[in-house]
Image (spheres, rainbow, N blue to C red):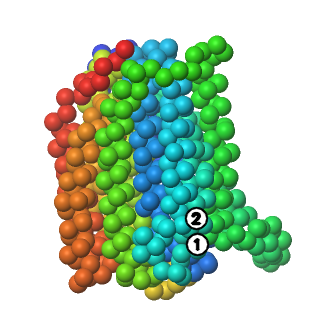
Amino acid sequence: MNIISVIHNEERLHWRQVLKCVWYLSIPAILSQMTYIIMEYIDAAMVGSMGAAATASIGLVAPVLWLAYGVCSAAVQGFSVQVAQFVGAKNLIYSRDTFRQGIILVTCLAICIGTVGVLISPHLPNWLGGSQEIYGGAYDYFVVYMWGMPIIMLRILATSMLQSCGSIKTASIFNSIMCLLDIGFNALFIFPAGYISFLSIDIWLPGLGFGVKGAALGTLAAEAVTACILMYLAVVRENYIRQKDGVQWHITPKCVGDAFKISVPIAIEQGVLTGAMIVMMLIVSPLGTVAIAANSFGITAEAFCYMPGYGIAIAATTLVGQSIGAGKPYFARGFAWFSVGMGMVTMGILAGIMYVFAPWVFEFLTPDINVRQLGTEVLRIQLFAEPFFGAAIVGAGALRGARDTVFSSGINLASMWGVRMPLALYLVGSHGLHGVWMAMCIEVCVRGMLFLFRVHRQKWNNRGSMV
């Protein structure tokens, strides 16, 4: 199905065509996200088999990793949104030039963030209130990830550019393969060499026995392989962004300025969200190792519900951006609303499934009975908010396609720091970790309703100035 041809050649779209376009781009992204979730579950189970302290050490520094990841991803969005609109306008010269400039600037930003991360890594576990029991694992995991930040960002850049061109299926396939590679590399790096029993047969498997550090090394190895493949496809094979011999690799104020306008609000949004998660970790840390581990596993388990929403959001950004680039804002509105509705329904159904199967999920993730029980209880609190979380995730993706990123940042700032933080601080004293997750549930509902209001009021015209 050629989405660009549909957008350009049709004067009006029936709701069935809209649904077909959204599903066509969403399904590969959702499958990729679901594969990623499975990988996260298996990774968590691998680390969890080493005990609650190993899980807590990763959970402690995870919000800071999300912050670094979010800032770099925001920079990627600054270029990929432009590419989506140039593709919609069939302007190959500018789409290719924008990709080149994205490679230069995103790589430089990733190097800077990685360097800062390496420098602060010896102090970070203490700053976050981690105990000596989990300091070593937290430091090892974080510093390895920071060294690999440029590799991770090149993979994200190539993925996002392919998605902006409509090649979501290709990007999803190779990101799914990355998940499988990650499992294999993690098994190699985390555990020592030894025998395992399979179908009553003892099989010897190699292993390096790096423990928690091995989890980061395994992920980076998988990221590196996938980054090479996706960058090759983007630079050489994809027509809208491929680079030919003799092109100029330079920076232009127009492209950088537009990227800055798009990226800065997204970066602020990510900073608000992950900054709040860091504060939440400071609130959770005094509750002990079991609470930290249960909180970490709860976030991992919840991904089953919300990661498909991010897949639909990718499709929404692409469809809205290409519709606006083609000068058809009424198409953009239809794609936005169908995407948001699909996200809410999908995440609501998955939340119901997770509510029933949560005890078995935690049984798979950790052998610690106390962590299982606490994790199941707090996760079930948050599951009631998943439909509204879907509205927030997909709504933000649709608005991003229209270059409307400022309001998203304002919504997240107001809801995270005006609702979640005060409630978490108030409820943690009387309800412990349950109170923290109650605050999360209430805040997500508020955020989702605000995004629904914004999508309703959006004019869906191009807020940027396209060449």
Q: Name the residue under label 1.
A: 137
Residue depicted at 60% across the width and 20% down the height: 243
Q: Which amino acid does label 1 sit on?
A: Gly
Q: Nearer the viewer, residue 295 or 217?
A: 217
Q: Distance between the residues labelled 2 and 1?
A: 6 Å
Q: Position of residue 396 (x, y in %)?
A: 31, 43
* Numbered badge on residue 141: 2
Q: Which amino acid does label 2 sit on?
A: Tyr
Q: Nearer the viewer, residue 261 or 460?
A: 261
Residue depicted at 46% across the width and 76% down the height: 130
Do we see residue 57 in this rendering?
Answer: yes
Q: How many labels, in total?
A: 2
* 318 vs 429: above or below: above
The reply to whether dot 2 and dot 1 touch (C-beta < 8 Å) is: yes
Q: Position of residue 245 (x, y in %)?
A: 66, 15
- In the shown orientation, is residue 465 left or right of residue 70? left
